[in-house]
């Protein structure tokens, strides 16, 4: 996310370090915020999105910002305001899926947190696609698609990340679906109901290398049944056999139960699995996040739903989107190890690093997703230590920063509480958001094809220019050492057809 020392300036040091027009000048947090006409907390969001960079003040009085960067951002903001459409194509996308209003968000006009509290992930996802609420619906992976996905996952290196495994599983599953290019609503929804369980069941059981067969998990008998949240209407089979999912969880059980053993070797306590199911439902969609925009661009080009999901997964792999929860996980682990949130927070700020899991530019107050997950974790005894660490982090930063916990901190608390790895945050996020990407694809398929093709504002040298001067090819990098069709060379400085 970003540099969180940006609010650490004392009011007495609120003037600019130098004049903004001076080359190489630096601005204090207060001066930069005043120049942009925003609150200091908004600067934090700008840094997290890569729009600004910050640097620790050598005098130890907070962070400073490059004056030229601030001026450039101010000019961009003014151009966006003048254009009337926000300056980017995402501002022109009409969607009836998610509304974010102050400190609440809604799926098709219904409070999203209430939906998640009363219905399972599958029920919420299917309702978002169809408009019909069917409690107890289950998604099943076709045997051929699941076998192909598992083979693809098995071929991956043992240290592959979850996003890598999910991407190859999606590609492999797509090849087995002969009707994937049928973009009619029923066909797309049918593919989605098959794809999500395929992605989950293709992941290796926690503790195994990719591709190894599950041997069943502890506690997969009667104690693991009935883990669906209120309103699902059905319970798991309670079978102790391996089942189609390759673990003790039967392929008729909820997605949350089947995902559990891919995230942690801990016994699938029903209350804990309910928290995971709630989290999946909360994260189904969140308006036009970066990965969702990528998914809609793919759908605009009439990519099939598997490719749409692959596009979303590619963006989710970035450090500013899907990986944010893993940073919060590591921070909370350190808090528990050291026994002091204040010390950990101080170390982050001293190093000019942001405190993960705090603040969200779309919520002026509290992130409702985080509040819902925290409320559910409060009822699980195993989560007490992780919850205490998360609340201590929030309290420690509140002394100087007006930032509340966001869903990344809640994901970190959930994964720490149940013995999951840091990357489990990304896995949960990706599986949950797949349903939202499909919902947005369904909307985009109804729009004019290729409408999301903006025109760039060229900033290069004005033509015409002479042909570039050839540079001799270094020894060992000629055609004999690796060439591409059409005479294009591989290696530094090479150019490929686009």
Image (tube, rainbow, N blue to C red):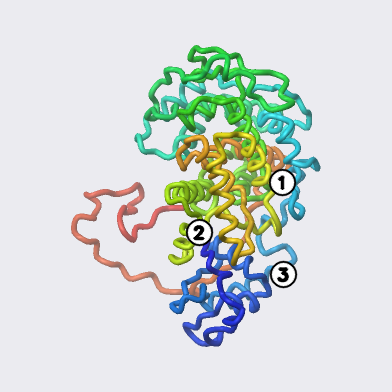
**Relative height, residue 270 to residue 334 (above, below):** above
What residue is drawn where x is 37% and y is 70%?
Answer: 468
Q: Is residue 350 left or right of residue 229?
A: left
Say what secondary structure mark 2 lies in: helix
Q: Is residue 167 left or right of residue 270?
A: left
Q: Which mark is residue 81?
A: 3
Of the residues under marks 2 and 1, which one precedes in the sequence?
2
Q: Which mark is residue 448?
A: 1
Front position among marks 2 and 1:
2
Q: CA distance from mark 2 to mark 1?
A: 53 Å
Task: Name the residue furthest right.
Answer: 109
What residue is drawn where x is 51% and y is 23%?
Answer: 145
- Mark 2 nearby-residue class (10 Å; few <14, some 14–19, many ≥20): some
The residue labelled by disc 2 is 342
Say what secondary structure mark 3 lies in: helix
Whether residue 311 is visible to the viewer of this picture, yes or no, is no
Whether residue 39 is visible to the viewer of this picture, yes or no, is yes
Disc 1 to disc 3: CB gap under 8 Å = no
Say what secondary structure mark 1 lies in: loop
**Which quadrant would residue 235 be assigned to in this image?**
top right
The picture places residue 99, in percent across and down from the top left corner, at 75, 48
């Amino acid at each position: 996310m970003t540099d969180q020392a940006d609010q650490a300036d004392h009011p007495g040091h609120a003037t600019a370090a130098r004049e903004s027009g001076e080359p190489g000048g630096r601005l204090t947090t207060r001066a930069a915020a005043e120049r942009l006409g925003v609150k200091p907390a908004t600067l934090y969001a700008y840094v997290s999105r890569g729009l600004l960079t910050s640097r620790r003040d050598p005098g130890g009085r907070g962070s400073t910002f490059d004056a030229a960067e601030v001026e450039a951002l101010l000019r961009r903001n003014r151009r966006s305001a003048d254009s009337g459409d926000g300056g980017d194509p995402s501002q022109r996308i009409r969607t009836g899926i998610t509304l974010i209003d102050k400190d609440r968000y809604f799926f098709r006009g219904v409070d999203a947190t209430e939906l998640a509290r009363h219905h399972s992930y599958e029920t919420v996802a299917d309702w978002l696609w169809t408009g019909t609420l069917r409690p107890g619906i289950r998604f099943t992976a076709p045997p051929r698609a699941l076998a192909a996905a598992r083979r693809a996952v098995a071929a991956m290196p043992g240290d592959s990340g979850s996003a890598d495994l999910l991407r190859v599983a999606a590609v492999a599953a797509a090849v087995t679906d002969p009707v994937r290019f049928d973009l009619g609503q029923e066909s797309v929804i049918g593919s989605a109901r098959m794809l999500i369980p395929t992605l989950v069941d293709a992941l290796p059981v926690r503790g195994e290398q990719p591709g190894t067969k599950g041997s069943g998990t502890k506690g997969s008998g009667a104690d693991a049944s009935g883990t669906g949240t209120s309103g699902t209407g059905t319970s798991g089979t309670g079978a102790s056999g391996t089942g189609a999912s390759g673990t003790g969880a039967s392929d008729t059980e909820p997605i949350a139960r089947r995902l559990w053993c891919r995230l942690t070797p801990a016994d699938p306590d029903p209350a804990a699995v309910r928290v995971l199911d709630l989290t999946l439902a909360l994260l189904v969609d969140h308006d036009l996040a970066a990965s969702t925009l990528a998914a809609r661009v793919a759908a605009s080009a009439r990519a099939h739903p598997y490719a749409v999901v692959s596009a979303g997964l590619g963006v989710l792999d970035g450090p500013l989107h899907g990986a944010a929860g893993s940073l919060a996980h590591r921070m909370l682990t350190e808090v528990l190890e050291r026994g002091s949130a204040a010390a950990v927070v101080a170390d982050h700020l001293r190093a000019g690093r942001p405190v993960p899991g705090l603040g969200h530019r779309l919520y002026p107050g509290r992130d409702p997703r985080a509040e819902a997950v925290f409320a559910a974790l409060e009822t699980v005894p195993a989560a007490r230590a992780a919850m205490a660490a998360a609340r201590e982090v929030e309290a420690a930063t509140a002394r100087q920063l007006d930032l509340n916990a966001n869903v990344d901190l809640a994901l970190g608390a959930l994964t720490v509480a149940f013995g999951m790895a840091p990357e489990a945050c990304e896995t949960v996020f990706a599986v949950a958001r797949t349903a939202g990407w499909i919902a947005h694809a369904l909307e985009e398929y109804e729009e004019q094809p290729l409408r999301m093709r903006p025109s760039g504002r060229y900033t290069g040298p004005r033509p015409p220019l002479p042909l570039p001067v050839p540079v001799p090819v270094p020894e060992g990098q000629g055609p004999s050492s690796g060439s591409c069709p059409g005479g294009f060379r591989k290696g530094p400085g090479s150019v490929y057809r686009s």
